[in-house]
Image: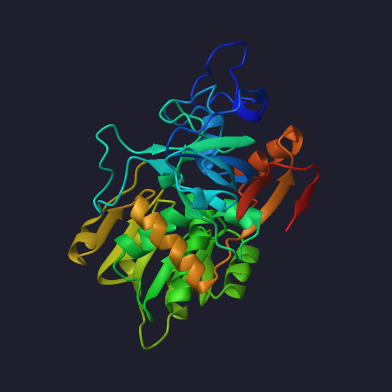
Amino acid sequence: MPKVITIEPIDGKPGKPGQVYYPLAIKNVPKPSPGPDDLLIKVHSAALNHRDLFLRQHLYPSPSFDVPLLADGYGTVSSVGFSASKSWQGKNVILTPGRGWKNDPAGPEDKTGYKILGGTKACEIGTLQEVVCVSQDEVELAPEHLTPAEAAALPLTGLTAWRALVSKSGNWEEGRNILVTGIGGGVALNVLQFAVAKGCRVWVTSGSQEKIDKAKSMGASGGVNYKGENWEKELKWQLPKDRPYIDAIIDGAGGNVIAKAVRLLKLGGVVVQYGMTVSPKMEWTMPAVLNNLELKGSTMGSRKEFKDMVAFVNEKKIRPVVSRVVKGIDNIKEIDELFEDMKNASQFGKLVIEIQGGGASKL
């Protein structure tokens, strides 16, 4: 029987949000049978996102103790339903990380809301398992230039980055100045890669000089340590004389980003927010109003945006950054270590589990 990994309650009871850390559990489940339009996929690799850590801490809605964790997955189609295209047989694919959003640029069409794969009662599919069954409409061919770990690292953060930068910022153009906060996380790194590939000039912030230097090696024009009280002044000195302002900020932190944005953004500039890791609230100021700044929320993306993102990754031969890989679905000890890496924000790139095999390796 195939193996899956879920979270499990402590003493048989759910814990208090933020005060519990659910352990991981390996379970054997019946092998799924593909429906008429389904594909049966042997999962080779899966990747973590922050929501997986939040689920273990009961800080994410509707955690499930039965649904496998993780939304990012890469594998090979081992069989197809009788109505599905036989051309999928044997193909390497990546899974779309959510359901209920086809192509509306405003947001999900499904009245019950967008459902992300992995670990919740909202969606029964997760990628931290040996075999998964999904509709043929919910996969894309994996870019051939990617390794299994890189392919698994792409879906959720790649989609989130694409929507934030391309669909929402209005500044995905050659020569524009883009500021990406909190470089090192998967979304921020994908934004950096997409923007550089388009010909934008990208600046980054981080609490680590090592991460800033790595970002520069990937094409960032410069960066500053956000732990400095006046980091926005330091960044302003780095901007080119021909365009001495930021056109758009792609932010996943929140906090005091608006106060800093007032001093950095052009008139009418935009802050696109895909997360608020510093605090669930932040201040919107009158100076931001007077500067005609825009604040846009952005989460995940549509099926169409996912397809467009994968096509761009193929065209530009972009390779997602992988921080660490552990091997084997039975390797609970080192899978737990990946969660610790995320908890400590020590990673630079995605954290990946290769489902088949044993041992561990760092990239």
Residue closest to the eye, 21 or 322: 322
Q: How many numbered marks, from 0 up?
A: 0
Q: Nearer the viewer, residue 175 or 325?
A: 325
Relative height, residue 241 to residue 62 (above, below): below
Q: Where is residue 303 in the image (x, y as percent from the top left)?
A: 36, 51
Residue at the image point whose x is 21% and y is 67% from the top: 291
In the picture shown, does residue 65 fall above or below 114? above
Residue 56 place in picture, x, y as percent: 56, 30
| Front-lying residue, 82 or 72 | 82
- Foreground residue among 142 and 330: 142
The quadrant of the image that shows the C terminus is bottom right
Residue extending farthest right: 359
User: Residue 193 appears at what percent x and percent y?
Assistant: 51, 68
Residue at the image position 47 percent from the left and 29 percent from the top: 124
Residue 228 vs 299, above or below: the answer is below
Q: Relative to residue 69, is residue 199 depicted above or below?
A: below
Is residue 103 shown left or right of residue 256?
left
Asked if residue 5 lies left or right of residue 303, the reply is right
Query: Can you tell which quarter of the image residue 113 is in?
Result: top left
Q: Is residue 220 visible?
A: yes
**Going by the picture, which residue comes out furthest to the bottom?**
242
If the image is split into quadrants, where does the N terminus sit?
A: top right
Q: Position of residue 309 (x, y in %)?
A: 43, 61
